[in-house]
Image (cartoon, rainbow, N blue to C red):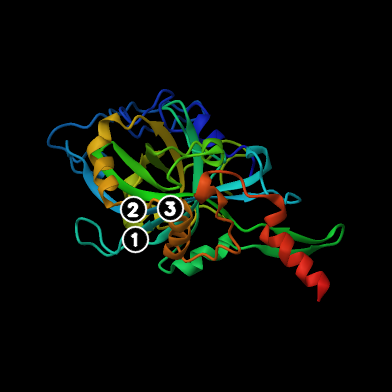
């Protein structure tokens, strides 16, 4: 994987309009790089047609609801991150409710890696991301969040840090119309955002537009996942893309390992009703430490291995309290 993965969302002709935002999203044809003339295609939805294989809907159609968790890993050689420069990667985990509004069976729990190591804040931000893991079992997904130790020939034992939890809230995925999918969240913990949340652009509430890339289309050079890592969608999903480079995200797409997408910042103004609905589901807890511990129980993670300081007061954990460092010292004393 290249460090230039975000080129997927920023390269001209990469499938999204240059000034795309949540208010005007529409999938467009991939621009060919050879000199073969390309037939012009009108992608504007027309009344009475099934443009883009979606039903026309002028109201917000709820696709899915659940818990959203924001996490990060400190870099190798760093006990605890104290700024974004010390962060190796940024994860978003979606844990859907058992059923959605249509009564369908639950989607999988997904672990999403955001290439820019933070959330987008405006329609100009197009952050590449992909499904790192998806499984019906939460514990299987969370294996990727634990510390891992390995041996190298040059420096000996190295430890990949466990994820630190930067925030937890409620999310809703909806389709305002056939051209766009949004995901909005309301933060539950910490009660007040702090230094850690500011670093990752985590706010009390926000919404984004999500577009999924057609895995059959080529990516810009040195960008995106390799051919072996790309998603292999079921036939019914792949058919929806046709010759389009991008489509609005659907829950079933996000259930597939290697699904590539872009997260695009948006204003929450058009989706206040959805976010108000989420706010009603969040139980108020006056004690931040109690709330942080409850969050860890809900998402089935051990707070001894995943420092909860960011959930308590929004601050970076102290380096001397790093669980991996404590484990290393205990092993030396044995």
Q: Earlier in the sequence, mark 1 or mark 3?
A: 1
In the picture as drawn, the residue positioned furthest to the front comes out as: 286
Regarding mark 1 in the picture, which secondary structure is present there? Answer: loop
Q: Note whether residue 224 is visible.
A: yes
Regarding mark 3 in the picture, which secondary structure is present there? Answer: loop
The residue labelled by disc 1 is 107
Expressed as whole percent of the image width and height from the top left, the position of residue 193 reads 47, 39
In the picture as drawn, the residue positioned furthest to the bottom comes out as: 334
The residue labelled by disc 2 is 251
Residue at position x 20%, y 61% from top?
103
Q: Which mark is residue 83?
A: none
- Residues at marks 1 and 2 touching, judged by CB atoms closer than 8 Å: yes
Q: Nearer the viewer, residue 32 or 333?
A: 333
Between the C-alphas of marks 2 and 3, the distance is: 34 Å
Q: Quadrant of residue 152?
A: bottom right
281 left or right, relative to 94: left
Expressed as whole percent of the image width and height from the top left, the position of residue 270 reads 26, 31
Q: Earlier in the sequence, mark 1 or mark 2?
A: 1
* Badge 2 density bin: few <14, some 14–19, many ≥20, Cα 10 Å: some
The residue labelled by disc 3 is 287
Q: Note whether residue 177 is visible.
A: no
- Residues at marks 1 and 3 touching, judged by CB atoms closer than 8 Å: no
Residue at position x 29%, y 64% from top?
98
Between the C-alphas of marks 1 and 2, the distance is: 7 Å
Expressed as whole percent of the image width and height from the top left, the position of residue 213 reads 43, 43
Q: Nearer the viewer, residue 233 or 181?
A: 181
Q: Quadrant of residue 297?
A: bottom left
């Amino acid at each position: 994987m290249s460090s230039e993965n975000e080129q997927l969302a920023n390269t001209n002709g990469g499938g999204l309009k240059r000034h795309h935002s949540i208010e005007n999203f529409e999938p467009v044809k991939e621009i060919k790089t050879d000199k073969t003339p390309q037939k012009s295609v009108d992608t504007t939805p027309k009344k009475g047609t099934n443009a883009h294989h979606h039903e026309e809907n002028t109201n917000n159609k709820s696709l899915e609801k659940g818990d959203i968790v924001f996490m990060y890993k400190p870099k190798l050689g760093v006990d605890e991150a104290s700024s974004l420069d010390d962060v190796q990667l940024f994860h978003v985990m979606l844990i859907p409710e058992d059923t959605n509004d249509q009564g369908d069976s639950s989607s999988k729990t997904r672990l999403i890696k955001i290439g820019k190591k933070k959330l987008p804040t405006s329609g100009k931000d197009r952050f590449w991301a992909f499904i790192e893991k998806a499984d019906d079992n939460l514990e299987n997904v969370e294996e990727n969040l634990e510390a891992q130790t390995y041996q190298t020939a040059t420096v000996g034992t190295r430890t990949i840090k466990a994820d630190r939890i930067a925030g937890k809230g409620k999310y809703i995925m909806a389709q305002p119309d056939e051209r766009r999918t949004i995901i909005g969240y309301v933060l539950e913990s910490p009660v007040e955002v702090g230094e850690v949340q500011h670093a990752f652009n985590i706010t009390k509430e926000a919404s984004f537009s999500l577009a999924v890339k057609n895995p059959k289309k080529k990516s810009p050079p040195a960008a995106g996942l390799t051919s072996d890592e790309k998603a292999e969608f079921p036939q019914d999903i792949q058919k929806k893309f046709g010759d389009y480079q991008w489509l609005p995200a659907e829950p079933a797409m996000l259930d597939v390992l290697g699904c590539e997408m872009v997260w695009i910042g948006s204003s929450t103004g058009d989706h206040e009703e959805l976010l108000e609905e989420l706010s009603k589901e969040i139980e108020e807890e006056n004690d931040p430490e109690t709330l942080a511990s409850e969050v860890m129980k809900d998402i089935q993670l051990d707070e001894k291995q995943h420092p909860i300081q960011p959930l308590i007061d929004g601050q970076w954990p102290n380096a001397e309290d790093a669980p991996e460092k404590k484990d290393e010292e205990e092993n030396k004393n044995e």
